[in-house]
Amino acid sequence: MKIICVGRNYVAHAKELNNEIPDEPVLFLKPDTALLRNNDPFYIPEWSQDVHHEIELIVRINKLGKNIDRKFAHRYYVEIGLGIDFTARDVQNVLKDKGLPWEKAKAFDYSAVVCPEFVKIDSLPDLSSIGFRLDVNGKTVQEGNSALMIFSFDSIISHVSKYFTLKMGDLIFTGTPAGVGPVKIGDRLEGYLEGKKKFDFLVK
Ligand code: ZN
């Protein structure tokens, strides 16, 4: 399986990092070794002093597809999840300044937190308005809603599948809302989707 991530999919987050609003989805990938599941603890890598949390809605692909037309994209997923795209911001800023790829900052081991259980789409009232949030040590630090995404689930799937064949089990991280910030040892991270807790783990 592969993990595809969308960058800068919320206007307020693009602005907080002084990035332009993209006219097509910004994509990057993480390998399967980036997965962190089952509420396992996250260990801050020793080579970064500024690892940020980015809470994101995740689409799980359930069918093989390439060059998927946007109007058929809804046929390629039945579940939405919640996770964190951990980002070594200090490393990313150095790479960005040099115009180099982001992989070291984005695709490192255990940088892709995925909630233990996904939510069936037909159990959600409205796919275009899914509320989610991240609490750190009991305080809400990021709040988002799929209504605020620049590119919808369907347009992301259509765009991604022009470049990468999608396979069953692939995960698409759909971008983070504003409020990203550093994590420190001892933090407890809890993610909520439509008010229901989806993950709960510690930073070590
Ligand atoms: Zn992200």
Image (tube, rainbow, N blue to C red):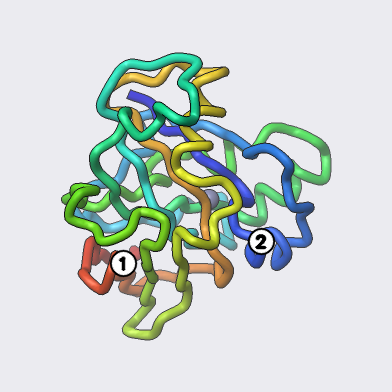
Q: Is residue 116 visible?
A: no
> In the shown orientation, is residue 58 left or right of residue 90?
left
Q: Nearer the viewer, residue 18 or 52?
A: 18
**Residue in the picture at 46% in, 50% down:** 85
> In the shown orientation, is residue 107 left or right of residue 131?
right
> In the shown orientation, is residue 53 left or right of residue 22?
left
- Say few, some or many: other residues with alpha carbon within 10 Å of mark 1 (under 14 / 14 to 19 / 20 or more): many
Q: Secondary structure at mark 1?
A: strand
Q: Is residue 27 above or below residue 89?
A: above
Give the labeled residue for mark 2: 11
Q: Quadrant of residue 101?
A: top right
Residue 118 position in % (x across, y down): 21, 49
Q: Is residue 195 above or below residue 10?
A: below
Q: Is residue 140 above or below residue 182?
A: below
Residue 17 position in % (x across, y down): 72, 62
Q: Amino acid at mark 1?
A: Gly
Q: Nearer the viewer, residue 186 or 134?
A: 134
For this orientation, the residue located farthest to the bottom is 139
Residue 127 position in % (x across, y down): 35, 54
Residue 69 position in % (x across, y down): 49, 23
* Dot label at residue 191: 1
Q: How many marks?
A: 2
For this orientation, the residue located farthest to the right is 98
